[in-house]
Amino acid sequence: MVNTSFILDMQLKLYQWSASDKDRTFSDLFNLICDRRTLIEAWIRLSRNRGSQTPGTDGMTRRRIEEQVGGVGRFVDEVHSELCSGSYQPEPVRQRLIPKSGRPGQFRPLGIPTLKDRLVQMALKFVLEPIFEADFYPNSYGFRRGRSTHDALAAVQRQLHPTNHGPSLTHYVIEGDIKGCFDAINHHLLMEEVKRRVRDRKVLVLIRSFLKAGIMIEGSLKHSATGTPQGGVLSPLLANIFLHKLDERYDRWMPRPREKPTNAVGRRRLDRRKGRPTFYMVRYADDFVLLVVGSRQQAEVERESLTEFLWQDMRLELSPDKTLITRPEDGFIFLGYRVVRTKSYKNGNWVGNLRIPKDKLKSLRREIKKRTSRATLVLPFKDLIWSLNPLITGWRNYFQYATYACKEFHSLDNWLWHRIDRWLRKKHRKTGARKLRAKYRAGQHPPMRNRWRDGKAITKQFSDGGTRRYRNRGIRIPNGWNEKELGDDPVMQGSPQFWRAYHALETMQSTGG
C-alpha cells in the first residue's frame, strides 16, 4: 500500500493553513504522527537511505529488521503502539567522529540515532516541516525542499551583479561564522520558537525527549543542556527553526515570506536615500554572509551589534577571528566557493564570479595522490577506478558552475591521466609503458582518448558534461506545496511538475510497475 498521496495531501493542507495565517497554532498533530500510514511512509524514506544500515546504540539495522519475525510490519506496529500508549522513549545517540575535509586532525561529531528513533523523527518531520516552511524567509537555503547550496551561491552572485538601474551597490561583506552552532543551540529557546506554531503538548514532549536523549561516548552516557545531534533526521529542521530568529533581524531589508520582491527593494532604496546602511543576508544553515551597502565603519558597527544580538537573544557566539569584513573585490569564501567581484572583459562592468579556491584544488590532488599511492598497488586496477570515479563525479557536479571551471577541469584531467599512468607503471614494472597504454587505454579518439579502462570499469573525467552557469531562480522556489504562491510565472512553475512526478511514482508502485 502506497502512502505517498496521504502524506502529500496532509502536508499541502498544513502548509496552506500555516501560510494563510502567520499567527495560527496547531494543537492536534500527534494523531498525524502516530498514524500508521505516516510511519510506513517514514520507513520507506528511511530504507532508501544508505544510513539505514548504520546501527545505533541498539545495534539494529534495516536488514536485521527485515529478517526478523514479522519484518517491517511488526516493527512499525511496535513503534505505533508505543507512541499511542505513551511508553515511547528515545534511546541515546551513538557518537561517531567524522574528519573535517581540508582540516587534518579535526573531527566533526556525528550523532547516530537508533532506527526506531529515526523512524519517529521522520514522522515528526513530515508533520512539522510544512508548518514552519511557510514561515521561513526566502534568503534561507539550507536543508529546505527544492533549495541547494548553488541557489544560495547564485543569490549572492546576483547581489554582486549590475542591475538595470546601475552597478551593484554592495560595498562590504561580513562573513558569518558561528562557533559550533548545532552543538550550542539552547533547548529552552528552541522550544519557545517551536511553541510559536505548535501547541500540541504530546508533540512538544516528544521533541524535548529527543533533545534530552543524550549521547553515548565510549560506553558512557552524556547529557547536555544544549545542541541538536548532527546526523539526526529532525536536527536540520530544528536548527532552521532556531536560526529563523536571525533572519527576522534583517526583516526590513529582506524579502518576506510570500511577499513581492519589489517591496524589499523599495525599503532598501528608501534607506539608502536617507543615508542609512542596508544589509542583505544569505544563509545556508549556520553559514551566512551579510552584504553591506554602506561604509566600513557601519559594517564594523553591525558586526559588533550582531555579535551582541546572537549572544543575548540566541546564546550563540560568533568566532571573532573568522567573522571577517572584506571587500567583494578581494573575494571571500562561501559554501566552498571563492566569491569575488571582477571587471567583465566584455563590457567592463563589475560582476560577481564564483571560482574554485586553490586550497580545494590542493586537497583534491592530495586525496587522489592518497588513493594512487604505493599502498594501493595491491588493488586490481578496476577497484582503483571505482574508488576514483565517485570522487571525480561528486567534485565535478559541485564545482561545474565556477568561472574558469573548464580550464581547471582540463588541467585536472591531464594530471589524473599521468597520475594513473604512473601508478600502472609502478604496478607492472616488467611491462613497458607502451604495452600498458595499449592494454588499459580506453581509446585513441575523443571522448575516450584520455580515459583508462579495465573491463567494464572506465575512468570518469572532470570535464564530462562541460560547465555551465547556475541560473538564479529568484526568491520563489517551488517546494511542492506553494504552487498557488508562484502565480503564472512560467519560470517558477516547478510545483506542478513536482506533483506530477509524485503521482506518477504512486501509480507505478501501486500497479507493481
Image (tube, rainbow, N blue to C red):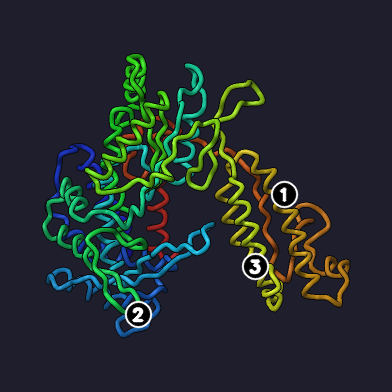
Using the image, determine if residue 359 lies above or below residue 154. Answer: below
For disc 1, the neighbor class at 10 Å (few under 14, some 14 to 19, many from 20) is few
| Residue type at numbered disc 3 | Arg
The residue carrying mark 3 is 371
The residue carrying mark 1 is 411
Badge nearest the viewer, 3 or 2? 3
Image spot of residue 307 (x, y percent):
31, 40
The residue carrying mark 2 is 59
Which residue is rendered at x = 35% and y = 77% of the image?
A: 218
Q: Nearer the viewer, residue 330 or 264?
A: 330
| Residue type at numbered disc 2 | Gly
Image spot of residue 397 (x, y percent):
57, 51
Which residue is rendered at x = 32% and y = 36% of the image?
A: 304
Sooner in the amino-acid sequence: mark 1 or mark 2: 2
Determine the CA span between mark 1 and mark 2. 46 Å
Q: Quadrant of the C terminus?
A: bottom left
Image spot of residue 416 (x, y percent):
72, 58
Using the image, determine if residue 40 lies above or below residue 238. Answer: below
Tally the numbered discs.
3
